């Protein structure tokens, strides 16, 4: 059966001139969206902005179930680690984790993040000294209130942050509160915290998937990281990740994750 003619007003295939832009009945696995009264993109939008087809492989339910369970089982094994081996980790692995994190969805696709990575011993020592100073105030001068300290007690954390010099890499995720264009103009970013939170999660998942460990460390306040790493005024530290292999024999708190019925509501 010959392909039908495409009826989309913005489809260049209709005149036989090239690649289809939006829904095109001449494309084997694309259909006009009959479910939608207001299809996205509208013909007007697609005429002004580039859109491309999105056609991920459609899997059957059983295959999806297996993949879902395999992924979940892998993620269940992830733990935050505070004791790292000093073993070197190739820079290409850190680059790959950052590239994966950078696939995160972001407000208006602004990707409002910078990942600053260092394996420089001097920089790591400076960062550790500054972090420990802040944490000393938190723990020893009671900047954390009693309720907070009570919540942390079972984890046994304190102001010592040796992992900051032992872990081979420190990666600081900075949020970009606004964007500075090459001509110096400033443009607002949107949903910066949400976007960076998602990117942080994807970074953690990428590291875990490749067999590395990290700690989601936020030595509050973190302004010292801006100075230590020489970052511009539009950036603010969001999370500090030490990255490496866990120290063989490392212990982690014997915590349990909440069962599904405590974290999910289906209605
Ligand atoms: N940022 C401090 C305190 C701390 C806070 C939380 I929430 C933790 O889960 C663990 C520690 C520190 O890193 O010690």
Image: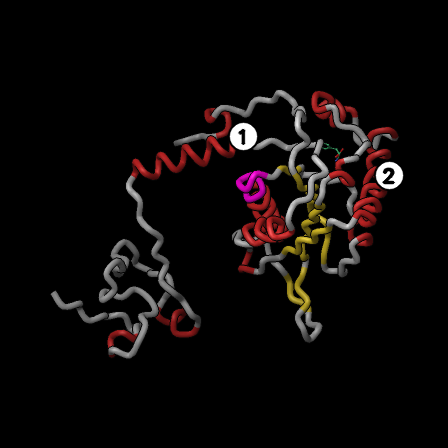
Q: Visible in this render: residue 223?
A: no
* Quadrant the N terminus occupies: bottom left
Q: Residue 169: x percent and y percent?
A: 70, 45
**Residue 174 position within the rendered picture, expressed as x and y whole percent measured from the top left:** 69, 52
Ligand 1: give its quadrant.
top right
Q: Main secondary structure of the magenta part?
A: helix
In this rendering, is residue 119 above or below 232?
Answer: above
**What is the secondary structure assignment of the residue under circle 2?**
helix
Question: Where residue 54 appears, x then y in whole percent?
Answer: 37, 58
Residue identified by numbered label 2? 133
Say whether mark 2 is within 8 Å of ligand 1. Answer: no
**Along the horizontal axis of the image, is 39 left or right of 89?**
left
Q: Secondary structure at mark 1?
A: loop
Q: Nearer the viewer, mark 2 or mark 1?
A: 1
Q: Quarter of the image holding residue 207?
A: top right
What are the residue bounds of the magenta stretch? 206-211
Residue 215's image quarter?
top right
Q: Is residue 7 visible?
A: yes
Give the percent coordinates (x, y) of residue 173.
67, 50
* Left or right for 8, reference 237: left
- Residue at position x 79%, y 35% in the image: 162
């Amino acid at each position: 059966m010959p392909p039908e003619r495409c009826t989309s007003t913005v489809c260049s295939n209709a005149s036989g001139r090239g690649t289809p832009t939006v829904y095109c009945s001449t494309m084997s696995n694309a259909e006009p969206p009959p479910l939608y009264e207001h299809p996205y993109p509208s013909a007007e939008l697609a005429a002004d902005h580039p859109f491309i087809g999105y056609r991920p492989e459609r899997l059957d339910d059983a295959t999806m179930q297996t993949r879902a369970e395999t992924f979940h089982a892998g993620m269940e094994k992830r733990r935050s680690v505070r004791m790292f081996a000093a073993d070197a980790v190739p820079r290409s692995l850190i680059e790959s984790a950052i590239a994966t994190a950078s696939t995160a969805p972001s407000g208006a696709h602004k990707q409002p993040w910078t990942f600053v990575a260092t394996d420089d011993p001097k920089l790591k020592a400076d960062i550790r000294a500054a972090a420990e100073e802040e944490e000393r105030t938190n723990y020893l001068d009671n900047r954390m209130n009693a309720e907070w300290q009570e919540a942390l007690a079972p984890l046994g954390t304190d102001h010592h942050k040796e992992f900051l010099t032992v872990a081979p890499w420190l990666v600081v995720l900075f949020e970009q509160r606004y964007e500075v264009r090459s001509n110096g103009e400033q443009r607002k970013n949107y949903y910066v915290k949400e976007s960076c939170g998602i990117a942080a999660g994807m970074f953690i998942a990428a590291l875990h998937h490749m067999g590395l460990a990290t700690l989601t460390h936020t030595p509050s306040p973190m302004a010292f990281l801006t100075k230590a790493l020489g970052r511009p005024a539009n950036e603010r530290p969001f999370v500090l990740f030490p990255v490496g292999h866990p120290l063989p024999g490392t212990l982690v708190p014997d915590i349990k994750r909440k069962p599904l019925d405590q974290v999910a509501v289906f209605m």
